Amino acid sequence: MNLPSLNEVEVFVKSYDLEGLKILHLSDIHINKKTSIKSVHKLVRLCNKCEADFVVITGDIIDCRVKHIEDKLRVLNNIEKKVFYISGNHDLFYGIIGLKTLLKDFTLLDNTSTFFKYKNCSIALAGLSDRFSKFFKIKREENKVINFLSEQKNSIFLAHQPKDYKFALKANAKLFLCGHTHGGQIYPFHYFVKLFQPFLAGIFYIKQTAIYVNKGLGYWGINYRYKASSEITLLKLTSKSVE
């Protein structure tokens, strides 16, 4: 896992309350047997050094059985900021229960919600388990999450796959964060990914919702990227575009 330079992105949100909020967005870390523990320590140091209010990981933290990488996963608990995360398809396949047990200081938002205090307001955060949940007898509670967020003034919706953005729109979430695509990882694989996902990478705006698709930090299949660099992104929310 080679750490890229911190990517900073300004995101316009339709809420004055969220002005100035900074979110460190990670996705698709894909920690496996070949991942060096040194690189995980570097990631933790970057997270702790970054001036973010909290950290979000939108799935696929692991890419092998938890028992093979317990030492590396425990290192992640040294992230000093509050960390919210949801499952990705790889997390479900390799063991979300074991992952949750080891990441004892993180908050798993699969099909549930919580609040984060920012300045004088409460930000509602909620997420969905990955779309592969049905193969692991895990019920995705879309309506529960949508109904909860719909009642909140300031809300952030997390999911692994970009195609779940429709639920964020139904919930009138101010921000939708996801990953999964790896930005295509290897060009021209980008075009194949676009057959299944509405967004490949970057920022998009639909109705009241800002959408950010993270290209991820790790690799899938082979340790190679082409025209789809890995990323660690600091999202800086601003309401300057709100009329």
Image (cartoon, grey):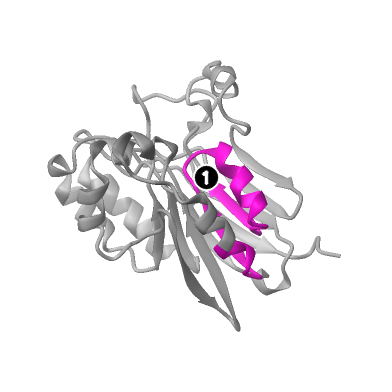
Helix, strand or loop under label 1: strand
Label 1 environment density (alpha carbons within 10 Å; few <14, some 14–19, many ≥20): many
- Closer-to-camera residue (225/162): 162
Task: Tell whether 163 sits left or right of 44.
Answer: right
**Residue 8: image location, x then y, percent:** 59, 53
Residue at the farthest right position: 243
Q: Which residue does the image show at 49% across and 72% down from the upper left? A: 115
**Residue 151: image location, x then y, percent:** 63, 68
Q: Which residue does the image show at 62% across and 40% down from the upper left? A: 202
Q: Is residue 239 above or below residue 63?
A: below
> Which quarter shows the N terminus?
top left
The kind of residue on which mark 1 rests is: Cys
Q: Is residue 230 above or below residue 115?
A: above
Q: Which residue does the image show at 66% across and 59% down from the upper left? A: 174
Q: Which residue is mark 1?
A: 178
Q: Is residue 11 above or below residue 178?
A: below
> Which quarter shows the C terminus?
bottom right
**Residue 148: image location, x then y, percent:** 55, 64
Residue 225 in magenta stretch: no
- Closer-to-camera residue (24/93): 93
Count the numbered circles shown: 1
Residue 168 in magenta stretch: yes
**Residue 35: image location, x then y, percent:** 24, 38
Q: Which residues are magenta?
A: 148-177
Tell me which corner region of the image, top left, top right, bottom left or bottom right, holds residue 120: bottom right
- Closer-to-camera residue (44/165): 165
Task: Tell whether 2 sits left or right of 123.
Answer: left
Residue at the farthest left position: 67
- Closer-to-camera residue (41/84): 84
Residue at the farthest bottom position: 120
Q: Which residue does the image show at 41% across and 47% down from the upper left? A: 129
